[in-house]
């Protein structure tokens, strides 16, 4: 197994183990125990007040997006200086010479274009990271009973 396969294998193992769990039953049991403790006065009022404050959780895009995130970040920067080689037996050296000639002819033009492409790619990765955070926030709100009660709309931002 290669290093690239390890995260996928770990996720498959977690999915296999979690398939046997009844999350709704576990959450219901936890909520019932917490309600019993609230009624019995186990929790002090200061603690209950802290529980009412919304959590400021900013999830890591690596966790939310999964194993594909590292590839998106890694491939965001384009490069001009790729290795020039050819495996063609007879004309390989001519192919490499032609590639070098074209590269030298475009040396003045390509770096600014690549800089623009890289800036765009980095912006796209940042937008994807923000979308991953918003998705995680919406999933958390759905798990915890809808809109969250913090005055914020559970509707996604409708910017043009």
Image (tube, rainbow, N blue to C red):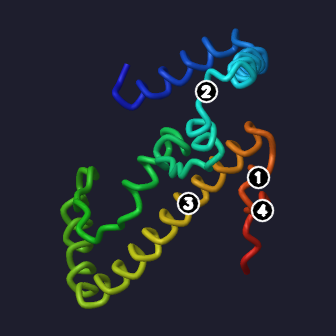
Residue 85, position as x, y percentages in the image: 23, 57
Mark 2 secondary-structure assignment: loop
Residue 24, position as x, y percentages in the image: 78, 20
* Residue in view at x 68 percent, y 19 percent: 37
Lower position in the chain sequence, tag 3 or tag 4: 3
* Residue in view at x 62 percent, y 20 percent: 15
Q: CA distance from mark 1 to mark 2?
A: 21 Å
Q: CA distance from mark 3 to mark 1?
A: 26 Å
Q: Marks 1 and 2: which is nearer the front?
A: 2
Mark 3 secondary-structure assignment: helix
Closer to the camera in the image, 70 or 5? 70
Q: CA distance from mark 3 to mark 2?
A: 40 Å
Q: Marks 3 and 4: which is nearer the front?
A: 4
Q: Which residue lies under the disc numbered 1?
A: 149
Query: Which mark is on residue 43?
Result: 2
Query: Which mark is on residue 128?
Result: 3
Q: Are marks 2 and 4 in contact (CB under 8 Å)?
A: no
Mark 1 Cα shell of 10 Å, populated few (<14), some (14-19), many (≥20)? few
Q: CA distance from mark 2 to mark 4?
A: 30 Å
Q: Which residue lies under the disc numbered 4?
A: 153
């Amino acid at each position: 197994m290669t290093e690239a396969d390890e995260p996928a294998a770990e996720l498959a193992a977690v999915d296999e183990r979690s398939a046997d769990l009844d999350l709704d039953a576990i959450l219901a049991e936890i909520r019932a125990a917490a309600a019993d403790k609230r009624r019995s006065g186990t929790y002090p009022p200061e603690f209950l007040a802290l529980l009412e404050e919304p959590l400021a959780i900013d999830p890591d895009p690596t966790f939310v997006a999964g194993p594909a995130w590292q590839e998106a970040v890694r491939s965001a920067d384009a490069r001009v200086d790729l290795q020039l080689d050819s495996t063609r037996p007879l004309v390989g050296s001519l192919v490499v010479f032609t590639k070098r000639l074209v590269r030298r002819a475009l040396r003045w033009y390509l770096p600014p274009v690549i800089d623009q492409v890289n800036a765009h790619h980095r912006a796209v990765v940042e937008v994807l990271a923000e979308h991953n955070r918003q998705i995680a926030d919406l999933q958390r709100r759905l798990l915890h009973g809808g809109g969250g009660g913090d005055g914020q709309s559970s509707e996604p931002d409708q910017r043009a």
